[in-house]
Amino acid sequence: MQKPRTLAAALAVSALVLLSACGTEQGAAPGAGTDTPDLPVQGSNWTIAAVTLDGTRSVAPPGAHLEIDGKGRAQGDSGCNHFGATVAVHGDTLTVSPQEVTEIGCPADRQRFERALLKAFSGDLEGRLKDKALTLTSADGRKGVELTAESDAPLVGTTWTVDALLDGATAGSLPAGSEGKAKLTFGKDGRLTGSLGCNRVTAPAKITDGTITLGAIATTRMMCTGPQMELETKLYDALDGPLTYRLVHRTLTVTDSDGQGFTAQAG
């Protein structure tokens, strides 16, 4: 009577061995047991350094940056327009689905870079993170984006370069020929200094949470080209009265009570 039980036990052991072998074969399937940890890119801010498209590398203009929040939502600035996308992270692969882009007119060189960036920052991209540098490359190597991690810019002590004018919810480009001319700094001494595009400007500045209140604005009285004076006039009007500001990474948005204002980039 013991034999059948012994035979049954042997058969059970054999079955377990077979099942274990099957499990081993399944475990050897691609990806099983060798999962790559997700790249830690969510909740991060990056300066866009360069873009490669079809073998051509283009250096990014000042102000180009990208932010990926903790929910996989990407927002950035090409140095010309603002853009948005969703980013799904699977190990070392980012799947980018572009969603929207504003339509501000910009100089031809910035438009060329923007077109290359929007094409490169899409689809499946393999990410390589080393120190503070993140490189995203397509499987065929024909497109890539080079990013550098950068800390948030503080409102006070940073030089802010105006890059767009705001009218309510609409962002407009600067007058052609005035790009990079308007730079503002909120000093630790409680004063605003800089240039509105042509003349130097200074004013007392009281900063509280989300609000900037300027005192009497003083400017020099130089005469400049038409575009620079046009920009200066718009900024001077926008700086009148209590201002609301929003600071996201290295982008500053300033508006008055009528929704008139500007955006500016750190540096």
Image (tube, rainbow, N blue to C red):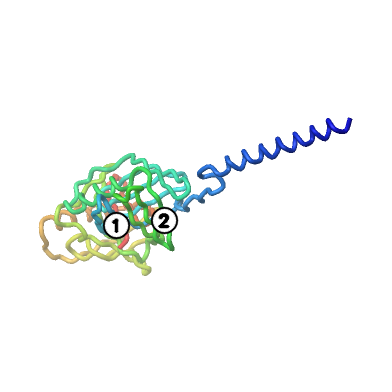
Q: Quadrant of residue 205?
A: bottom left
Quick one: label 1, few (<14), some, or many (20+) residues within 10 Å?
A: many
Image coordinates of residue 59 in percent, x first then y, are 26, 58
Q: Is residue 5 left or right of residue 78?
A: right
Image coordinates of residue 15 in percent, x first then y, are 70, 35
Q: Work out whether residue 146 or residue 220 is closer to the camera in this orientation and state it.
A: 146
Q: Is residue 126 above or below residue 194?
A: above
The quadrant of the image that shows the N terminus is top right
The residue located at (48%, 48%) in the rendering is 91
Residue tagged 1: 50
Image coordinates of residue 207 in percent, x first then y, are 39, 59
Q: Is residue 39 visible?
A: yes
Disc tally is 2
Eye-nearest disc, 1 or 2: 2
What secondary structure is marked by label 2? Answer: strand
Q: Farthest bottom residue?
A: 189
- Cα separation between marks 1 and 2: 15 Å
Q: Work out whether residue 175 or residue 239 is closer to the camera in this orientation and state it.
A: 175
The residue located at (35%, 42%) in the rendering is 123
Q: Work out whether residue 111 or residue 33 is closer to the camera in this orientation and state it.
A: 33
Q: Farthest front residue?
A: 3
Q: Quadrant of residue 198?
A: bottom left
Quick one: label 2, few (<14), some, or many (20+) residues within 10 Å?
A: some
Decide which of tag 1 and tag 2 comes sooner along the chain.
1
What secondary structure is marked by label 1? Answer: strand
Q: Work out whether residue 142 or residue 187 is closer to the camera in this orientation and state it.
A: 142
Q: Farthest right residue?
A: 1
Image coordinates of residue 165 in percent, x first then y, are 24, 50
Disc 1 marks a residue whose amino acid type is Ala
Residue tagged 2: 128
